[in-house]
Amino acid sequence: MWELLNTWLISPFDYGFMRRAVVGGLALSLAAPPLGVFLVLRGMSLIGDAMAHAILPGVALGFLLAGFSLPIMSIGGVLFGLMVALLAGAVSKMGGQREDAAMASFFIISLAAGVMLISIGGSSVDLTHVLFGSILAINSTALLLIAGISTLIVLTLAVVFRALVVECLDPLFLRGQSRRSGWVHSVFLGLLVLNLTAGFQTLGTLMAVGLMMLPATSARFWSKRLEGLIGIAIVLAMVASTGGLLLSFHLDIPSGPSIILLAGFGYLFSALFGRYHSLAAKLRRKTTPLEVEHGA
Amino acid sequence: MSQRSLSRLQLHNLHLAQARRTVLEHIEGDFKPGAITALIGANGAGKSTLIQAIMGELRPISGEVVCTVPKERRAWLPQQLALDLTFPMSVEELVMTGSWPSHGALSGYCAAHYRKGREIMARLGISHLAHRPLGELSGGQRQRALFGRTLMQEAELLLLDEPFANVDSETVDVLVRILRQMADDGATIIVVLHDMDHLRRLADEVLMLNGGHGRWVAPSALTHQHAPAQVVPFSLGGRHVGTA
């Protein structure tokens, strides 16, 4: 028994690249799900996807300039992602178009530009690598970068947490309360871009958003409280990233998709058997008796 | 009831437009501290536009809004529908967000804040709901919680958009009492109302918007005029404007 556990769960981490990958995955699992929870709560679930595409041209430019250097590619990604977010905001303010419409337009342009740039400067292997990630390429620099960005995200979230909550619930109230309210949204978008850039090494630009959204959407089936949502989403992300890595190691399948598919399995399971709003919850729901509201 | 002290909110020859279409013109107003002003008019008469302008969300074409109440002491309670009711937040957490002006959005709450929050919930009769998520409340309970936030905020200028819609009569009684207390403490209160009965109970002054203009009328004149009617006959769905 112990032998089996050892072979399946422990011994893969004898390899340095697996250790680095799991640490990177766990770091991402701390930072990404809370952002995803806020995106879901704001009804902006698809913005994460859009931003993931938006960072691609920046990553590609970094790749063209410096080859496969994660820091340079990340800087390019962050700059480009922020630029697209700002542009989308500006277009929607200027033309009365909704922000999501502007965002959708920009992200398609970005995706095409990114793919074009990488294809010009590199091979199809490079393209696959950027789009879908590769744990094998995580070196210590990359790991430091991922851990650093994740730490920054968690700390910043802790500072702006309450402002973010109120912005989700009642943006008008926040605007009334503080001159800096426009800021909260920008900081949030900035964190989103940072997180996606950190994620693309392990998961690729397209799948980095999966570790952000899937645990968050799954958590909605298990908790009705914000703390609960965030906690559950983080645990789910950690299980998915570690489990996905192990699966990819043993079954010799690509790491990014196996992590995200595992998270996706978690989502389906939650939708079927979760505590709230799931299929099972609908089936077992009984009418509650009349409550005594003004007792005692 | 109104005190003869300096007004903290004045409107001078206000001209407001939405999407380049004039909504209101030549609006004059002098809102006294301690007075509750009812804002009435048909759907589309410009009540929300005027409120936006007072809150500084909409820039006037000409004229000005002079408001000496600091921004963080102005409270604006939109119609309940504007809020995401499935948001995972408890009543107590919502009430506590009202304490931002006094201690900032980024630092934590201290014991004194929590004590004040609990007192306010007791005043509103929602102590037993403190840890209930917003999504599980009735319309009346939710409105009490939102009032709790406003009380926590120590609002000096309070704008309410149909605060009694979807609210049970017991809650209306509690909220009317609280609004009167806030006014007596010197707050300037503006309430969008549709119901004549509520207007009679609450309003010290009435600003009636009609055909792009505002008219100040005495509540007594208005209630006599419509004496037996309970509700001003404006439908909620349409966008017809009185005489325009």
Image (cartoon, coloured by chain):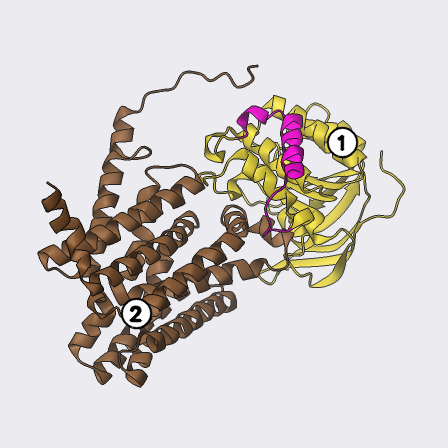
In front of the other: B153 or B167? B153
Give the residue drawn at x 71%, y 59%. B15
Q: Disc 2 residue type?
A: Ser
Check if residue B119 falls in the magenta segment: yes
The x, y position of residue B227, in whole percent, is: 73, 25
- Identify the residue under disc 2: A140
> From this viewpoint, which residue is outermost toward the top?
A296
Decide which of A18, B181 is in the foreground and name it: A18
Q: Colour of chain B?
A: yellow
- Does residue B159 show up magenta in the picture? no
| Residue type pointed to by label 1 | Gln
Judge whether residue A197 can be spotted in this image: no
The chain carrying label 1 is: B
Residue A295 is situated, as x and y percent measured from the top left of the image, at 55, 15
Residue B127's disc is none
- Label 1 SS: helix
Q: Quadrant of residue B172?
A: top right
Within the image, what quadrant is residue A144 found in? Answer: bottom left
Prevailing secondary structure of the magenta residues: helix
- Per the rendered image, the range of residues in magenta is B104-130
Tell me what hue chain A is rendered in: brown
Residue tagged 1: B181
Residue nearest the observer in this picture, B113 or A290: B113
Could you tell me which quadrant the C terminus of chain A lies in?
A: top right
At which x and y percent is residue A8? Answer: 13, 50
Up/down of B202 relative to A64, above or below:
above
Q: Categorize mark 1 by other alpha carbons within 10 Å: few (<14), some (14-19), many (20+).
A: few
* Mark 2 closeness class: few <14, some 14–19, many ≥20 residues within 10 Å: few
Question: Within the image, what quadrant is residue B175 found in?
Answer: top right
- Give the spatial CA distance, label 2 vs label 1: 64 Å
